[in-house]
Image (cartoon, helix red, strand yellow):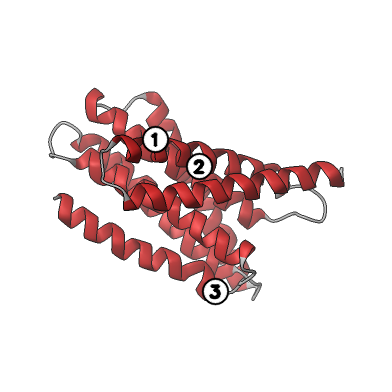
Amino acid sequence: MENSIRILIYMHAFFGGVGLLTGFGSVIVKKGSVLHKKMGKLFSISMVISSLNSLPIAWMSNHKNIFLFLIGIFTIYLVLTGNRALKLKKEKYAGKIDLVISGSMIIFSCIMILIGTYRLLNSQSNSILFLFFGGTALFLSSKDFRFYKKLDKVKNVWLIAHTGKMIGALIASVTAFIVAGLQLDNLISWILPTLLGTIYIIYWNRKIA
């Protein structure tokens, strides 16, 4: 069993590293270029594989961590909706898969908030992290439904959604590197990348608009 866990952890770390490098690469190169698209595709695949590997790890003995399990789901949500935004550019309407992805994230984000509230009331650790990321996930997944209604009405709304979600997934990769790779497991290490990334997302949203 321990060997299986070790393999999953190595795969999680490897694809997470690939996602981190290709994520930064896709941000640096010219947006819309062939290289940007190729790096973006590799980033998406790597992040999904890495996050999928983290889900069973978070439930295995001596590795149980409900917070990391929920963060893994949140990361997969960001990548999927970020890529779906590109398809919705042409389709102009949200399909069942979009509603399921966003609706599921709303449920999981509410679970995060409930766990965070319970832990806060009982003075348990990581309560702020559950509330912070649960609130962020709830805000983004709820916002999806407003985005779906604007597809054929607001210019470049798909690009704003795509940029925000993919940068959000990159933020998750950076946070994982800081916390797991550099072993800086504290509140600032978890939250600071999101705060800085949010500023970058706001900058790009205004530039696109």
Q: Nearer the viewer, residue 194 or 152?
A: 194
Q: Residues within 10 Å of mark 2 (few under 14, many from 20)?
A: many
Mark 1: which secondary structure?
helix
For badge 1, the amino acid type reads Lys
Q: Is residue 121 visible?
A: yes
For badge 3, the amino acid type reads Leu
Residue in view at x 51 percent, y 54 percent? 173
Residue in view at x 61 percent, y 40 percent? 52
- The mark that comes first in sequence, 1 or 3, is 1
Q: Is residue 172 left or right of residue 62?
A: left
Q: Marks 1/3: CA distance?
A: 34 Å
Picture coordinates of residue 55, whole percent (x, y): 65, 44
Residue in view at x 59 percent, y 65 percent? 179
Residue at label 2?
76
Q: Is residue 147 left or right of residue 47?
A: left
Residue at label 3?
187
Give me the disc on residue 38.
1
Q: Residues within 10 Å of mark 3 (few under 14, many from 20)?
A: few
Mark 3: which secondary structure?
helix
- The mark that comes first in sequence, 2 or 1, is 1
Nearer to us: label 1 or label 3: 1
Nearer to us: label 2 or label 1: 1
Q: Nearer the viewer, residue 41 or 80?
A: 41
